[in-house]
Image (tube, helix red, strand yellow):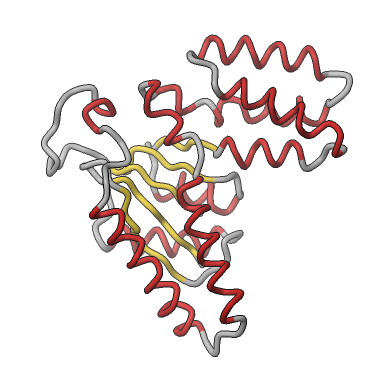
Amino acid sequence: LLVAIGIDPSGRREVLGFDIGDSESKASWMDFFSELKQRGLTNVDMFVSDAHCGLKDAITTQFQGSLWQRCQFHFSNDCTSILALKDRKEVANRLKDLFNAPTYDQAVERRDQLVKDWQAEFPKVVKKLENSFNELMVVYQLPEELRKRLRTNNTIERVNQEIRRRDRVIRIFPNDLSVLRLMGALLIEQNEKWAAGPRYLNMTVYHGIEKDDNSEEAGMLKLVK
C-alpha cells in the first residue's frame, strides 16, 4: 500500500492519498505522484522518507526543486542491522547524539569524530555515514524547534503499524478493491482525528513570518512511505 501524508499550510497533518502499488518500484511511485498532482498537489517544500531508490528517484523526477530529507530513524536502523548485537546500542546512541546536534557545524564535528572512532571497528557504518550525511542533514535548513518533527517519517510509520495490525486480523483480502476500502476507512478516520486535533507544526516559525492559515504562499510538507 502506497501512502502519502502531508502537513498543510495550517500546520496540521493530512492524508494526501493512498493506492495499491509496489513500494520498491519507481513506476508505482511515479504513477501515484502523478495522480496526486492531477488532484492539485503543488508547491511541496520538502519530502521525508526512507532511501528506497524507486521512491527517491520518483520524488526527484516529479517534484524538482523540493527538498528531500532522508529519515534518520531508518538510517540508524540500516546501520545497526549490519552489526553484531553487542555493538548496536553503542552505535545507535552515538548516531542519536549526532542527529541531536544543535547546529549543522556541530553535526559535522560529531560526524568527523565518529568517523575517526569507527574507521577501524565499523568501516561499513562509516561508509554509510559519509555517503549519506548530506541527505540526513537537510533538516538543518529549518528552525531548530521544528527539526525533530521533520527528521523522520515516524508519523507514517505509526499509521503503517495500524495498517499492518488490521491486515493481520483480516489476513486474506479477496481483491485490491477490498484492501482499498478497509485501509481507506482507516486512513479517513485518522485524517479526521488530525483535522480536529492540534497543529503538528508551528507554521509561523516554519515560514519565519506570520501567515494566514489559508495563505496560498504556504507550501506543503510531505511524508511518504
**Which one is in front, 69 or 90?**
90
Q: Is residue 159 above or below residue 100?
A: below
Tell me the quarter of the picture where residue 65 sits.
Answer: top left
Circle count: 0
Tell me the quarter of the picture where residue 190 sits.
Answer: bottom left
In the rendered view, does 219 fall on the left or right side of 147? left
**Which one is in front, 195 or 43?**
195
> Residue 195: image x %, image y %?
25, 54
At horizontal 58% and vertical 78% (from top left) the residue drawn is 169
At horizontal 49% and vertical 63% (from top left) the residue drawn is 2
> Residue 52: image x %, image y %?
61, 50
**Which one is in front, 221 or 194?**
194
Q: Is residue 87 above or below residue 153?
A: above
At horizontal 24% and vertical 57% (from top left) the residue drawn is 40
Q: Is residue 45 above or below residue 30?
A: above
> Residue 122: image x %, image y %?
84, 26
